[in-house]
Amino acid sequence: MTSMEQQLLQMEQEEQELKFTSFSNETALKLGLLIVEEARKNGKSITVDITRAGQRLFLHAMEGTSVENENWIRRKNNVTNYFGSSSWHVACRLRSEGQTMEEKYGLPIADYVGAGGAFPLFVQGEGQVGTVTVSGLPDQEDHDLLIKVLRRFLSPETK
């Protein structure tokens, strides 16, 4: 198995594993603040967006980010909402096939981007209810930051 195949399998497992039992506005606030805290702890500057059913529940742009980060978030969210997978999972799968979203699906680059940083918010028994997205770091780092915080947030010890 190639390293890309292993990475794709790992991302599939993340999407199966990282599910909420419920997701409220208060959950969004706590999760958003935890993501900001993790970035700050690592000396990183990001913009964070949490959206449920089309409503933005959390947005924070750290010092050193710009309005362009929000455009990246919009495009990453479009990918995650369209495919029901993390934006990095979709980007890596397409890269492994030597394809782009525009070529394979006719999705315009102005609205969809193959980049890491958006993750679907899954609620058990409901499916995908929204997205949690970061922008400001290289693709893999955006993705890894989210996964690390989601794992910590959803672990039984933090409940």
Image: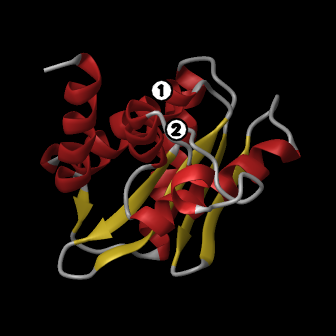
Say which residue label 1 marks. Answer: 140
What percent of the width, then of the height, locates residue 15?
26, 52
Tell me if residue 66 comes above or below residue 85 in the rendering: above
Q: Please identify the quadrant where the N terminus is shown.
A: top left
Residue 100 horizontal side relative to residue 91, left or right: right
What percent of the width, then of the height, locates residue 107?
63, 61
* Label 2: which secondary element: loop
Tell me if residue 121 comes above or below residue 127 in the rendering: above
For image coordinates 48% across by 59% down, the residue present is 80
Asked where in the image residue 159 lies, by quadrant, the reply is bottom left
Tally of numbered discs: 2
Residue at the right extreme of this rendering: 67
For image coordinates 86% across by 39% down, the residue present is 66
Residue type indicated by callout 2: Gly
Tell me if residue 91 comes above or below residue 141 in the rendering: below
Front-most of residues 12 and 18: 12
Q: What's the mark number on residue 116?
A: 2
For image coordinates 54% across by 35% down, the residue present is 37
Q: What's the mark number on residue 17?
A: none
* Label 1: how many Cα within 10 Å (few below 14, some 14–19, many 20+): few
What percent of the width, then of the height, locates residue 71?
78, 52
**Mark 1 or 2 closer to N-term?**
2
Asked where in the image residue 75 lies, by quadrant, the reply is bottom right
* Label 1: which secondary element: helix
Front-most of residues 118 and 39: 118
Marks 1,2: beta carbons within 8 A: yes
